[in-house]
């Protein structure tokens, strides 16, 4: 299990998706009951893999429920926020005492097919790096998980203003009229904590981190 820590309560956990047999051998009974209804083996493995990461960090007594939008929340740790992402062979969990988000993809995914839906002309001009479309996609998914609501448009409501591959940083914004429940729940301390700022018009600006892993994953997160 790999960890990237900013502070004790702000952490990104990442790990591989093990075989179903390995995950089942150490899973909690309630999680085994939950995945029994999943038809897809890969979906069962994803679920058990991110739960294993979470329990490894916080302990096996952690209780997770889902809100109306389907996002996970930590019932046993009401002061902590959580965000989850997974792709074919890896999972990531962001934990923080303020609003947080994470998205992860494989770099060999064809992002250009969907580019007209999420990549603006201004964003295309941010960099000539071939990984730009992947970075913008992950950044917008991260923003959506932090502040999104159903019906949010990836072009109209979300924007990426800067991408620095050398420093591993991305800055994005969420339109004021698109900010959903996560922002409503956020306190003044959330917005002053360093990763999020709100201007006088209500637009949310978020500073995100970006990781490119040796095995070909891109991870964008804000904790």
Image: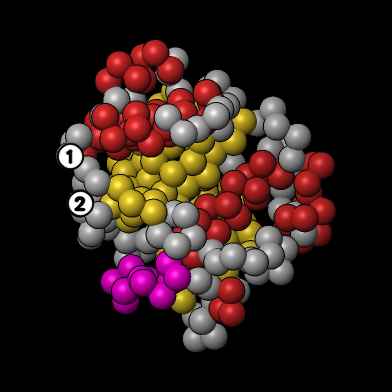
Kindly identify which numbered label has been placed on residue 76: 2
> Closer to the camera, 21 or 181?
21
Relative horizontal placement of residue 86, taking residue 125 as reference (left or right): left
What element does badge 2 sit on?
Answer: loop
> Closer to the camera, 25 or 133?
25
Q: Is residue 10 positioned above or below 216 on the image?
A: below
Instruction: Residue at 21%, 53% (x, y): give it.
Output: 77
What type of secondary structure mainly makes up the magenta span? helix
Instruction: Residue at 28%, 52% (x, y): give it.
Output: 74
Can the viewer see residue 138 in this picture? yes
Q: Quadrant of residue 119?
A: bottom right
Between the C-alphas of marks 1 and 2, the distance is 8 Å
Tell whether position 175 is magenta. no
Q: For the N terminus, give its image quadrant.
A: top left
Q: Are marks 1 and 2 in contact (CB under 8 Å)?
A: yes
> Closer to the camera, 73 or 123?
73
Q: Which residues are magenta?
A: 181-191
Can you identify the residue that label 1 sits on?
61
Q: Is residue 45 positioned above or below 76 on the image?
A: above
Precedes in sequence: disc 1 or disc 2: 1
What element does badge 1 sit on?
Answer: loop
Can the viewer see residue 210 in this picture? no
Kindly identify which numbered label has been placed on residue 218: none
């Amino acid at each position: 299990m790999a960890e990237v820590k900013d502070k004790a309560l702000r952490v990104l956990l990442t790990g591989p998706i093990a075989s179903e047999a390995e995950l089942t051998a150490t899973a909690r009974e309630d999680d085994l009951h939950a995945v029994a209804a999943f038809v897809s083996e890969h979906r069962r493995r994803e679920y058990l893999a991110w739960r294993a990461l979470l329990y490894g960090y916080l302990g096996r007594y952690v209780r997770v429920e889902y809100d109306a939008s389907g996002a996970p929340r930590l019932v046993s740790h009401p002061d902590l926020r959580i965000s989850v992402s997974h792709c074919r062979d890896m999972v990531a969990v962001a934990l923080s005492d303020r609003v947080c988000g994470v998205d992860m993809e494989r770099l060999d995914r064809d992002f250009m097919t969907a580019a007209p839906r999420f990549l603006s002309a201004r964003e295309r001009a941010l960099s000539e790096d071939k990984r730009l479309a992947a970075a913008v996609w992950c950044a917008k998914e991260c923003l959506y998980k932090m502040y999104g609501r159903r019906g949010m448009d990836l072009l109209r409501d979300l924007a990426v203003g800067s991408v620095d591959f050398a420093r591993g940083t991305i800055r994005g914004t969420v339109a004021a009229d698109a900010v959903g429940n996560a922002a409503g729940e956020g306190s003044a301390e959330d917005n002053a904590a360093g990763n999020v700022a709100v201007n006088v018009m209500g637009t949310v600006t978020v500073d995100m981190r970006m990781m490119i892993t040796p095995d070909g994953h891109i991870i964008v997160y804000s904790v």
